Image (cartoon, rainbow, N blue to C red):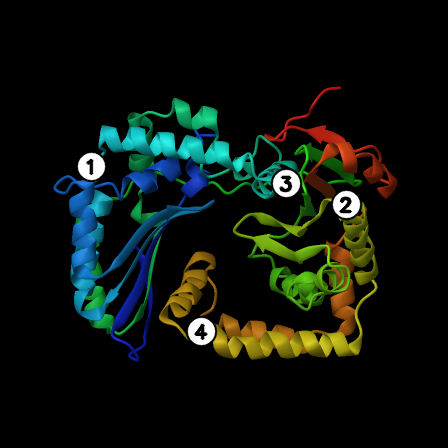
Amino acid sequence: GIKILGIEQNELPLVDFQITIKGGLLLDDINKVGSANLVSRMLMQGTKNKTPLELEQAIEDLGSNISVVTSDDAIIVRGNCLSTKFEETVNLIKEIMFEPRWDVKEFDRLKNETIESIKRSKTSASSTASLVFSKLIYGNENIVSKNTAGTEESVSALTLDDLKSYYVKSFSPQNANITIAGDISEDDAMDVFTGLEIIWKKTDVTVYVPKSFKTLESSVVYFIDFPGAKQSEIRIGNIGLAYTHPDYFKATVMNYKLGGSFNGIVNLILREEKGYTYGARTGFTGSEFPGYFIASAGVQSNATYESVGIFKDEMTKYRNGISPEDMKFTKDALIKSNALRFETIGALRGMLGQIAKFDLPYDYVKDQEKQISEMTLEELKDLAQKYIHPDKMVYLIAGDKATQLDKLKELGFGDPILLDKEGNLIKN
């Protein structure tokens, strides 16, 4: 029952493939967040018959690259190898996936590493702002608001048995797909992958995708204090669309001139004209569950209020639509970039990954080009008014409270609310 999608591409003697198992963070217990992440890291720390060093050597001997990572909605096993080493690489991946070592010493090491990494991230205004923004958008009780790495507390409490429980529950073939691109025929690829049917047994697990999300009726300003910070991190946005929503791709096209590229309005003003930042962007995220619309930049501390005001003003103006010249620029840039988007086998495999994950038509890229070319100025304006609401957004700033907080009261959204670095309310 595992869906396999492939593209044969013979320019180089290479194969790029990925086994995607739906779940990831979505299957974490909300009180034990970090389990999925540690499972994926533990799988690379040896097998029943190989120590971590022996596994590393076996991968090196093949000249292959193998990785296992956790995302918000999947655990992803990826391999890249010479086509002559494909079968051996897949066999090694089978060993990694189905014969984990569960070494106690490695578990303790990875656990401590993860906790230290979480602590370090709290010293970064950028990392903190992004994580807290997600909590403000989704709400603290929603699993998708969490960091896949977990928190210091949740990771500290995890045991090896917790990881084994997650592994047994989540590694299910009915939630998996395989995508492959490169110098290999369909028959040869299927011969190698068919062996999975013998060793990979179904488990009784359902991955639930969050359905309910809160919406904002008015904008709220939040502030996280990083005393003495020379730069402020700005995150502005609201709940958006799922990737599967009919308007999702159109919304990304609509956003392109606002902040979807280097030549977007917000970057041209904040970087090129004002010199406040190295980069300012706006965009939509989305998976099987709604993502969010986000405007973001790291700006000079003394330009915090002005930069937030520029974001707010430009989003407001954008709701009135764009010029015919800007529409032509958007269409030309997006359609021409497609010619280069799928040059590598990694990019081809990535396209197949989208098809498999969202059950898209095989020619979805052509459909997207059609949507770009047929978009009218009126449709773009309607989309902007439907999905960009500067008066109903979270405005989050991480920076120096002593010099920047008071000025933000002038935005017109009330007094900023102080949060700690976990996103909790600081009581006066």
Which residue appears at 24% of the width and 60% of the height?
A: 64
Q: Which residue lies furthest to the top in this view?
A: 428
**Quadrant into which the C terminus falls:** top right
Q: How far apart are marks 2 and 4 (CA)?
A: 42 Å
Give the percent coordinates (x, y) of residue 335.
59, 77
Q: Residue 302 carries which label?
A: 2
Q: Which of the marked residues, 2 or 1, is nearer the chain's N terminus?
A: 1
Is residue 29 rendered to the left or right of residue 329? left
- Residue that badge 3 annotates: 133
- Check disc 4 and report the residue beneath it: 342
Sequence order check, earlier mark of 2 and 4: 2
Q: Which mark is residue 101?
A: 1
Q: What element carries label 3?
A: helix
Kindly identify the residue that appears in the image at 38 percent across and 38 percent down: 36
Gap in Å between the C-alphas at discs 4 and 1?
37 Å
Q: Distance between the residues labelled 3 and 1?
A: 37 Å
User: Which class describes the residues within 10 Å of circle 2: few (<14), some (14-19), or many (20+)?
Assistant: some
Q: Position of residue 44 (x, y in %)?
A: 26, 44
